[in-house]
Image (cartoon, grey):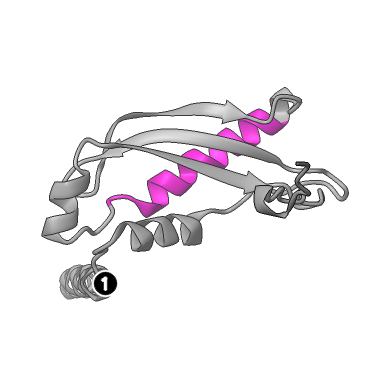
Amino acid sequence: MLRRSTSVVVAAGLLALAFAGAGKAIAQDRPVATLEEMFARLQRCWRAPALPRGHPGMQITVLFSLQRDGQIFGKPRITFETPDASAADSIAYRTAVMETLQHCTPMPFTGGLGDAVAGRPFRVRFDDRRNQPKPAEKQAWLLPKTL
């Protein structure tokens, strides 16, 4: 009988330590005060799917809204995918985007930013074209002029 109650006390103690550690991790997480910080946090959460060697990668865009408390509001929606992506690639990237949103939310907003972003749509593009050269940017002011 003593063993049983001791194991219950030890288990309860370990459980309390686990919750205390989780609370500290959340408490130490700095609140997000600007949109720049919010997008930086999303970028840190992004984990691109594993691709075979030589795979070109793809682009995908998601549209979503957040509540004041940083929770996702409604259903995120994919609005763009690289047109020539295979069905398997599409599923892998959609999964990676949704996992990113799950890992990053609730977003720990400051009160002011939470009020400012509540219900507003955000469109975020994830560009994972690892093995493709980035296209050169055309700058209109550098083009020769004909008079």
Left or right: 51, with 96 as reference point: right
Give the overall secondary structure of the magenta segment: helix
User: Residue at 50% across / 26% down in the picture?
Assistant: 79
User: Residue at 68% across / 51% down in the picture?
Assistant: 139
Q: Does 97 lie within the magenta span?
A: yes
From this viewpoint, which residue is outermost toward the front? 147
Query: Could you tell me if residue 137 is visible in this image?
Result: yes
Density class for disc 1 (Cα within 10 Å; few <14, some 14-19, many ≥20) is few
What segment carries the magenta color? 89-106
Disc 1 marks a residue whose amino acid type is Arg
Q: Position of residue 131 (x, y in %)?
A: 81, 51
Q: Position of residue 54 (x, y in %)?
A: 88, 48
User: Residue at 78% across / 49% down in the picture?
Assistant: 144
Describe the element under mark 1 as helix, strand or loop: loop
Rendered position, 41 above or below 75? below
Rendered position, 26 above or below 63? below
Disc 1 target residue: 30
Query: Could you tell me if residue 49 is visible in this image?
Result: no
Left or right: 61, with 83 as reference point: left
In the image, 103 versus 116, the foreground residue is 116
Q: Position of residue 18 (x, y in %)?
A: 27, 70
Q: Quadrant of the image for the N terminus?
A: bottom left
User: Residue at 28% across / 71% down in the picture?
Assistant: 29
Rendered position, 78 above or below 35? above
Left or right: 71, with 85 as reference point: left
In the image, 5 versus 78, the foreground residue is 78
Q: Quadrant of the image for the C terminus?
A: top right
